[in-house]
Image (cartoon, grey):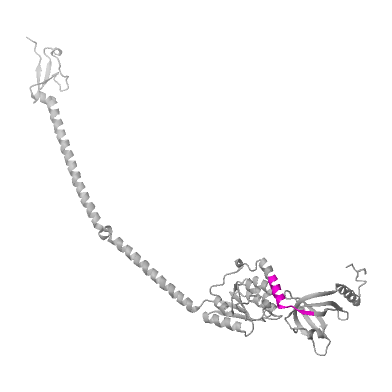
């Protein structure tokens, strides 16, 4: 498209409303006819009128279009058009010059068949799986005993009754915060997303259950909606889904942290059974009691074995044994010492006898004498007669005493 050749507007030269409306109408006319897919949220074909008014919504975004169509197209549609139905329409955009509104003038409406819906769900399944939203590693473990359970379900539904009744029957102390929403139709996805966001922000809610009874493929379409799947994946609180029955597996089941086959199974998965827990606790108590008794018996047996040992049975026996050994050693020591003393005494006597026999006193006793040159005790011993002169005084030591003598000249 080429740029508009008209000059730009200014504050001094503005365009009138009719000029703007005309230009917008021209631009819209250039778009031509288009095929559009969406979900019908409003179908109005009043009797006696030639034009029907419809609203087409994008299931994955909060965007809507106003449609106008010949009334016979709406009345003659097979199957009949209804709110919540997926359709593909063909038409051309029209800009109503007088009101300044935009609508799509439809000349053909086709209902999206179940086979095509399932094919689109499979394509979305592949996309979400490639992004890792189905990865088991991202799924969180449910709390062992939640204090408060958030429940998103239809008002006065059998699913709500099953979840609340079974859960409170299993664990009477469990509390519920129930938010009722539409579970099919055009309002289901936005209401469920609002409820999930509300419960996810509540710090008291430990786990969220998204429950619905069974239904047709068309009834369960909101639970394969891309926006709902991404909303469940973004929840910080663990989410349990119980959508339909065992064969029903919408995409939200793959994104949730746990998929339950039925609302009853969901109730069983979020809370333990009080009777089973009580029996299990009693079993653990019995095992603990037996283990404690066995441990006490083992310790008592070990103590008995320790007490039976001689050192503990008669502690003084070792002392008495050592006392006898010490007494024997003392006796042996005394004997050794006495023998040594006797041997040393004999040696001393022998040495004394030897000294006595070899000493000067013994020699003197046999008649010998020691002659000292001089009368003093300290005088030198006279060893030769030549060392004396007539008249010298000598000191003669005998065995029993000493006498003095004088040297006389030899005759």
Q: Quadrant of the C terminus?
A: top left
Stretch of the chain drawn in magenta: 109-124
* Residue 286 x %, y %: 41, 73
Q: Answer with the quarter of the image where residue 140 lies.
A: bottom right
Residue 231 position (above or below residue 163): above
Q: Residue at x 48, y 79 (%)?
A: 275
Given residues 34 and 274, the one toward you in this image is 34
Q: Residue furthest top?
A: 411
Q: Quadrant of residue 118?
A: bottom right
Q: Main secondary structure of the magenta part?
A: helix
Q: Quadrant of residue 73?
A: bottom right
Along the horizontal axis of the image, is 172 left or right of 97? left
Query: Is there any visible trace of residue 234 in the rendered image?
Result: no
Q: Position of residue 355 (x, y in %)?
A: 14, 28
Which residue is depicted at the point 35% across and 64% down?
299
Quadrant in which the N terminus appears: bottom right
Q: Is residue 364 visible?
A: yes
Is 398 drawn above or below residue 95 in the view shown?
Answer: above
Image spot of residue 175 (x, y percent): 56, 80
| Residue at screen point 15% across, 36% down | 345
Give the image location of residue 389, x and y in percent.
13, 12
């Amino acid at each position: 498209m080429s740029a508009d050749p008209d000059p730009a507007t200014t504050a001094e030269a503005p365009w009138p409303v009719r000029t703007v409306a005309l230009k917008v109408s021209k631009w819209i006319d250039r778009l031509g006819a288009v095929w559009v897919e969406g979900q019908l949220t409003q179908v109005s074909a009043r009797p006696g009128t030639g034009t029907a008014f419809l609203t087409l919504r994008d299931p994955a975004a909060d965007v809507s279009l106003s449609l106008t169509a010949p009334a016979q197209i709406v009345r003659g549609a097979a199957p009949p058009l209804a709110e919540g139905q997926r359709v593909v329409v063909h038409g051309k955009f029209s800009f109503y010059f007088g009101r300044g509104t935009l609508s799509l003038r439809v000349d053909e409406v086709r209902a999206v068949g179940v086979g095509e819906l399932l094919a689109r769900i499979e394509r979305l399944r592949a996309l979400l799986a490639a992004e890792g939203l189905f990865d088991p590693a991202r799924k969180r473990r449910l709390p062992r005993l939640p204090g408060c359970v958030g429940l998103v379900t239809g008002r006065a539904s059998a699913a709500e009754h099953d979840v609340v009744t079974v859960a409170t029957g299993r664990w009477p102390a469990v509390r519920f915060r129930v938010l009722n929403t539409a579970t099919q139709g055009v309002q289901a996805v936005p209401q469920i997303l609002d409820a999930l966001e509300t419960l996810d922000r509540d710090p008291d809610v430990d786990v969220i259950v998204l429950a619905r009874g069974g239904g047709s493929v068309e009834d369960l379409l909101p639970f394969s909606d891309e926006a709902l799947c991404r909303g469940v994946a973004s929840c910080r609180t663990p989410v349990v889904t119980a959508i339909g029955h065992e064969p029903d597996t919408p995409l939200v089941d793959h994104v949730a942290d746990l998929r339950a086959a039925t609302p009853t199974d969901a109730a069983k998965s979020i809370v333990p059974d009080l009777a089973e827990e009580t029996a299990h606790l009693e079993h653990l108590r019995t095992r603990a009691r037996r283990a404690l008794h066995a441990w006490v018996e083992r310790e008592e047996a070990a103590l008995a074995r320790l007490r039976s040992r001689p050192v503990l049975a008669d502690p003084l026996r070792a002392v008495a044994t050592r006392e006898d050994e010490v007494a024997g050693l003392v006796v042996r020591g005394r004997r050794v010492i006495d023998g040594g003393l006797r041997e040393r005494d004999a040696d001393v006597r022998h040495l004394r006898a030897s000294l006595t026999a070899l000493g000067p006193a013994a020699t003197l006793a046999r008649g010998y004498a020691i002659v000292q040159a001089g009368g003093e005790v300290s005088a030198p011993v006279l060893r030769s007669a030549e060392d004396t002169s007539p008249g010298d005084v000598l000191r003669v030591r005998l065995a029993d005493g000493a006498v003095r003598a004088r040297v006389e000249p030899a005759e």
